[in-house]
Amino acid sequence: MIENTMLGNSVNERSGAIPGPAVPWLTVASMAVVMAYADGFWMMTLRGAVGAIERTEEPFASWLRESTLVLPVFVFAVLGALALALHLFGPVLRPSRTVLAALLVAAAGTAVGIAEIAVSSAYDYDLQSSQLQLMDSMSRTCTEGNCLALQQQASLGLQVRAVGYGSGILLVTNLVLVGWVAAIRGGRLDISRTRRRTARGGQIDHRRLFLAAALFGSAAIHAAVVPEHLGEWAAAGAFFIILAAAQLAVGLLSIGRPHRTMLLSVAAVSIVPLALWLCSRTVGLPFGPAAGVPEPSGPSDWAAGVLELSTLVAAVVLLREKGRLPRRPPASSHLRSLPVVAAIAVSVLGLAGTGLASFDNPGSPGEESVRTSPH
């Protein structure tokens, strides 16, 4: 039996067959969509319940926009849960294992939803705290104790309770939704599907897809801040135009078969902006209008930095592996897809931090996007 399996694997490798189960993207997408938009609805409901008036305008548009922005994160969570279920239970689920796999998916989606509510509540508290400080500076009517500290403590306690209640609501909601999706599919939960087609010469592997996705994400984030930097310093704006174009071009090249020159180009367009970003956020750039002054960082900064560091590491690993035989069997399609989905999720969240797809209400002041612009 073992010899037949090994013989079959070797035949697959020689004939170009793709071994292992494939990702059931219909299952991943359906569960990610229902949990992302349902959890987003509860987040908007809790935001209104705690009186976060700064972000309660146009609730439907805010719900639709914010739920869509975090959808790639839910896709990553569902895909990770299915990869774990595949590892624990195998590609074919018995009824008892179907329930356990569904619980893993619901738990992963709930974890993302709780993180989403926690981040939203922290941002709401920051806005409310600023409003309380402004009101306290304008009218000193309190004569007993520190009213500002008491008000801020009460606001913080309200946000913490909202996260606690929301966690329970999200868990129940996601359990019901995952069960509902499994029920309309006949009580089955597909954690894998059989892939019978053979590999073709032009097929893109997941490592090249990851490089392309991460480079496209970095280029999009840098392109989004070009207008802002052109207004501050023309040279900085021109740099970001060139950087975005270079990362886009190298990303397109990485879709083809990797070679040494392409991998060196990936490393170059990753390490240069990463080094400049680290310098500007620690000691300040030695040139420009704010020479020697460290700049503040924000979510989009970190997103671009994570993408550039990831592509740099991936390029170095591929350069070291060039011409070497793999020491271990290839990972499953589920695991190979996780870095690609993660790169897309980080890119979308980074774009949200630039103000191009802001988590704030439409028409809100752009102070936050200015404060958190990358590089």
Image: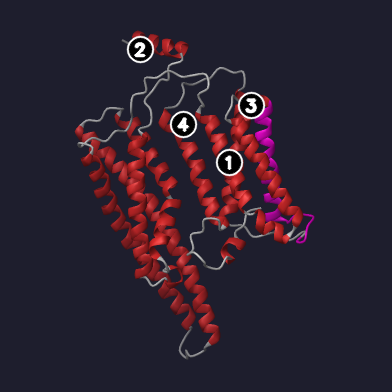
What separation in Å lies between label 2 and label 1 (alpha carbons)?
40 Å
Give the extent of the magenta segment.
Answer: 261-290
Relative placement, left or right, of 228 versus 4 is right
Q: Earlier in the sequence, mark 2 or mark 4?
A: 2
Q: Residue 160: which quarter of the image?
A: bottom left
What separation in Å lies between label 2 and label 4 (alpha carbons)?
23 Å
Question: SS for tag 1?
Answer: helix
Q: Residue 295: which quarter of the image?
A: bottom right
Q: Earlier in the sequence, mark 1 or mark 4?
A: 1
Q: Earlier in the sequence, mark 2 or mark 1?
A: 2
Residue 324 sits above or below residue 190 on the image: above
Is the residue under label 3 in contact with that under label 2 (CB below 8 Å)?
no
Is the residue under label 1 in contact with that under label 2 (CB below 8 Å)?
no
Whole-percent x, y for residue 208 in the image: 55, 30
What residue did someone put label 4 on? 336
Q: Residues within 10 Å of mark 2 (few under 14, many from 20)?
A: few
Q: Disc 1 residue type?
A: Phe
Residue 165 sits above or below residue 109 on the image: below
What separation in Å lies between label 1 and label 4 (alpha carbons)?
19 Å
Q: Residue at x 57, y 56 (%)?
A: 354
Is the residue under label 4 in contact with that under label 1 (CB below 8 Å)?
no
Q: Earlier in the sequence, mark 2 or mark 3?
A: 2
Q: Which mark is residue 5?
A: 2
Depth check: 189 or 319 in front?
189
Relative placement, left or right, of 105 versus 321 is left
Question: Is residue 227 magenta-colored?
Answer: no
Is the residue under label 1 in contact with that under label 3 (CB below 8 Å)?
no
Question: SS for tag 4?
Answer: helix
